[in-house]
Image: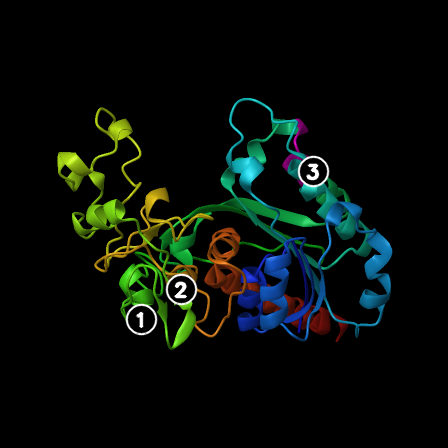
């Protein structure tokens, strides 16, 4: 068993994936009050701190960590990605969220868990280059005797029905750890990618603004009359390029970019990457493939590979934000299984050497 300590946990995508892999969720910390409600509801046995990590003393966890049985620890930290995804050539010194990765680092350096996992946008490693938080983080891990691997992955390679690129870092103080092989795609166990249909086609049909009587999270946002007309004019996989002229926005009439906006998903392909506005028809390719509405909270969660019994709390916008910010559950599950196999192999090797 490996004990998980989830920093910047949000609603619990990483924790749920690791739990499904067989790891034990011990603790989580996040400052989002709605995410805290969701997390506590779904992980009632875990200790949760609704705190800002920047003002949370490192030794606050000392008694909690020392009270555990002598089992390996995994610290995961998926800091808010917005300052990194928006970062381009210039610097954004006003966004103090950039320092959050280094706040996570001080807990690692203090407690020295056997394993570390972080997931973020690929732009993270480019913020300030060699003087940035990611390079500082990696250098500090190596000085603390961690063996570190990181690279950009595609979530669809690990069973998630989304074209979602993410940066993942894994580290071990025990011995070298490699990345797990992809599970989906040509040449792997599952030769095809998981599709939108695989995850949401079975859900009951609902209208825009309606809540399913069987599942309060299967709830779709309302649409204005003109947006209802627009989505009715949009075929599966289509977008505003299929509308008649009278439905076009003025800003789109002489502009061909951003065609995903007001788009419908396709059934038989992975979706585009979900964002914190993933249930809003006007904010991306978030239209249901055939029903005249944006995807529901439950459908968004399914596309992030949350189990259907996972309950989200908060208002519509908050639930969408929680889901969009979450680590896809199946990505975490695959990596959790990989950590567990790595530790089991480490113990076998250690025992054979002792014998």
Q: Which residue is mark 2?
A: 302
Q: Which mark is residue 203?
A: 1
Disc 2 to disc 3, how far (Cα)?
A: 31 Å
Give the residues in magenta: 131-138
At a point 22% along the width and 39% down the height, the residue shown is 240
The quarter of the picture where residue 173 lies is: bottom right
| Quarter where residue 256 is shown | top left
Q: Are marks 1 and 3 in contact (CB under 8 Å)?
A: no
Give the labeled residue for mark 3. Answer: 99
Q: Please tell me which of labels 2 and 3 falls first in the chain.
A: 3
Whole-percent x and y of residue 74? 68, 61
Determine whether 263 is above or below 246 in the image: below
In the image, 289 versus 173, the foreground residue is 289
Q: SS class of the residue under badge 2?
A: helix
Return the x and y of residue 65 as percentages of the image width and height: 81, 65
Report how far apart the C-alphas of labels 1 and 2 lie in the structure: 10 Å
């Amino acid at each position: 068993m490996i004990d998980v300590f989830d920093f910047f946990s949000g609603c619990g995508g990483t924790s749920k994936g690791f739990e499904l892999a067989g790891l034990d969720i011990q603790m989580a910390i996040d400052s989002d009050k709605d995410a805290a409600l969701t997390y506590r509801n779904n992980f009632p046995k875990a200790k949760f701190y609704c705190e800002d990590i920047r003002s949370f003393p490192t030794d606050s966890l000392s008694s909690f960590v020392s009270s555990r049985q002598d089992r390996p620890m995994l610290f995961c930290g998926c800091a808010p990605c917005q300052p990194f995804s928006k970062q381009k050539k210039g610097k954004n010194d006003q966004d103090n969220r950039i320092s959050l990765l280094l706040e996570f680092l001080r807990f690692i350096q203090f407690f020295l868990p056997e394993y570390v996992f972080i997931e973020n946008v690929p732009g993270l490693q480019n913020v300030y280059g060699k003087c940035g938080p990611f390079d500082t983080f990696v250098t500090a891990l190596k000085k603390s005797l961690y063996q570190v691997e990181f690279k950009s992955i595609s979530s669809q390679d690990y069973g998630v029905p989304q074209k979602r690129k993410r940066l993942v870092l894994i580290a071990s103080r025990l011995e070298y750890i490699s990345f797990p092989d992809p599970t989906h795609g040509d040449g792997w166990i599952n030769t095809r990618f998981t599709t939108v249909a695989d995850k949401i086609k079975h859900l009951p049909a609902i209208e825009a603004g309606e809540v399913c009587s069987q599942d309060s999270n299967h709830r779709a946002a309302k649409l204005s009359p003109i947006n209802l007309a627009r989505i009715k004019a949009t075929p599966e996989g289509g977008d505003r390029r299929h509308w008649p002229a009278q439905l076009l926005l003025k800003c789109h009439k002489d502009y061909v970019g951003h065609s995903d906006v007001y788009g419908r998903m396709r059934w038989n392909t992975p979706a585009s990457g979900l964002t914190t506005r993933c249930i809003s028809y006007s904010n991306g390719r978030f239209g249901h493939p055939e029903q005249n509405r944006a995807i529901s909270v439950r459908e968004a969660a399914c596309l992030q590979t949350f189990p259907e019994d996972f309950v989200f709390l908060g208002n519509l916008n908050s639930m969408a934000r929680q889901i969009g910010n979450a680590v896809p559950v199946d990505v975490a599950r695959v990596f959790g299984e990989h950590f567990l196999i790595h530790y089991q192999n480490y113990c076998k090797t250690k025992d054979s050497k002792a014998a």
